[in-house]
Image (cartoon, rainbow, N blue to C red):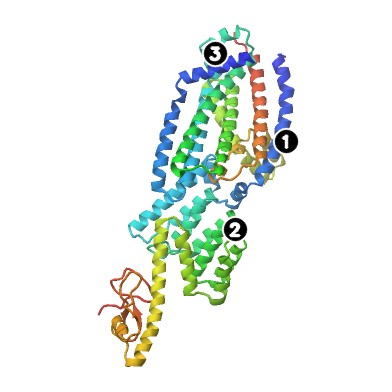
Amino acid sequence: MTRVAIVALNTFREAVRDRVLYNLIFFALLMISAAVLVGEISIGIERLVIVNLGLTAISVTGLVMAVFIGVSLVYKEMDKRTLYALLSKPVRRWEFLAGKFAGLLLTLAVNTALMTLGLIAALLYVTHTLAPADANLLVAVYFILLQLALVTGLALLFSCFSTPMLSTLFTLGIYLAGLFSADLRASGMSGNSRALELMTRALYYVLPNFSNYNAIHAAGHGRAIPFTLVWANTAYTVSYLLVILLAASAVFSSRDLK
Amino acid sequence: MRPEVRVAVPAIAALFLLLFTLQVRIDAITRNLPLQKEELLLRSARMLKKMSLGYDALLADLYWTRTVQYYGLKRLNDDPNFELLSPLLDLTTELDPQLVVAYKFGTVFLSEHPPAGAGRPDLAVQLTRRGIAANPEEWRFWADLGFVYYWYEKDYANAADAYLQGSRQPLAPIWMKAMAASISAQGGSYRTSYFLWSEIYQSTQDAEIRKNALKHLQTLRAEEDAQHLVEIGKQFFARFHRYPAFSRDLVSAGLLPAVPVDPAGYPYVFTPDGSVRLNPSSPITSEKISPPSKP
């Protein structure tokens, strides 16, 4: 476990050294301008715009980071040949992968936490007070983090056997397919082919269902998100991550790295 | 076979079984959430929702802002052509069926006569009915619907029905039921109209809507005043066998303590046939008591 933590910490340090967290400046500017301008150009939705814009920005920024950093996690180590030095030490391949994953997730979590603080500050500036319903915002942020964890896992899996360019395409492809998996199933059900229906239904359950994590609407309107959904989404994400990391570990351990 | 692969294959199979169970559970939970239901109610904006990649909430805000800008620009330019107003409102509310403010303001924007609005109360009724379907707990939508029927459509049966249905909502105020009874019994009346516009005036936070409500209140007050003055003019006629030429004639005759003025402070004008009109300089407008045309 210590070895995983060491790899994770180094991955986080590397991300910070690479100025990944500079995206926070963009986020801060976005929130400041939204907080100042929204009251001038719209009616009655100042809070809503800040929440929707803030959560969307957190999600998009996190997705971009998860995909583009995630796909190069393993590839970069192999390309620079630092992986060979690392694996010659008593570090198992799965530990290396788990550490890389945890490191990027830590980076994303820190980034998301700082953005959430910015969002809350902007919300306070606009509404001058926080209501109990604003706690749903934290649930929405948590769902975004779960989504980012899955995307990071996918990017890591593909980076074990493919180039960054192809891994990006694979990850984004799976992300989009997972976002619309319910529509995929519905289209299969509306056709006349039993085989197609079975296939789309199977895809619905096999693909990671990213629409599970969309809580931006609920947070914007201060609607309560049931606790059962929180735990179900958490269990779903943990289970799916285990699938991805097990698959990544199996693929990576089978690779001939000579 | 490597040990990692030996462990991974059965573990992944078992985990997919667990994932299947969890997804079925998540589907059951989200099916009961209001947001999921409303997405099925409004199918026409589905493509736009898909293209927004799940960020339809933000897209709805952008569309609402665009609607406000569109309406504001039309008002600023005194342009009575609001043909894009209804489609913009439809898209906004289909993207975010909970955006209460879009229904509320949209109803006013659509109902008001040009150049203040699109003059389409029929579209306002459709919009409000969709708002009710998407937000069944919002009693105010029923009040808005009743108001559109009452004031703009003069459809008193539907207006009374809307207020009655709204009065059955858990948080509805008691006056909703009284309004339903009053409209059923009397149809359109000064007292009802005055109450409804006062309610809008007091409940809105928006300066433009408030200004519009005040304008309607002043017009109602002027129309009511004019009716009273006609009656007093008849008393004047009974005594002097002619109608008063000026408002001050009524004061001289002791029928009024002071010269009657409209809510904007302008004296009313008497015509030779005994009817009462608004002063041509008054900013108040009314079709019923429009100022006498100049010779």
Question: Picture quarter containing residue A249?
Answer: top right
Say what secondary structure mark 1 lies in.
Answer: helix
Residue designated by label 2? B171
Q: Is residue A11 visible?
A: yes
Residue designated by label 3? A78
Q: Amino acid at mark 3?
A: Met
Chain holding disc 3: A
For the residues labelled 2 and 3, say whether their Cβ atoms are less than 8 Å apart. no
Counting from the top left corner in percent of width and height, residue B161 is at 59, 68
Earlier residue among tags 1 and 2: 1
Residue designated by label 1? B21
Quadrant for the N terminus of chain A, please: top right
Counting from the top left corner in percent of width and height, residue A241 is at 64, 27
Along the line of sight, the residue nearer the viewer: A229 or A181? A229
Of marks 1 and 2, the one in the foreground: 2
Q: Amino acid at mark 1?
A: Thr
Chain holding disc 2: B
User: Looking at the picture, does residue A52 appear above or below residue B158?
Assistant: above
Work out which residue is located at the far left of the displayed protein and give it: B295
Along the line of sight, the residue nearer the viewer: B259 or A114? B259
Q: CA distance from mark 1 to mark 2?
A: 39 Å
Quadrant for the C terminus of chain A, please: top right
Q: Are marks 3 and 1 on the same chain?
A: no
Say what secondary structure mark 2 lies in.
Answer: loop
Chain holding disc 1: B
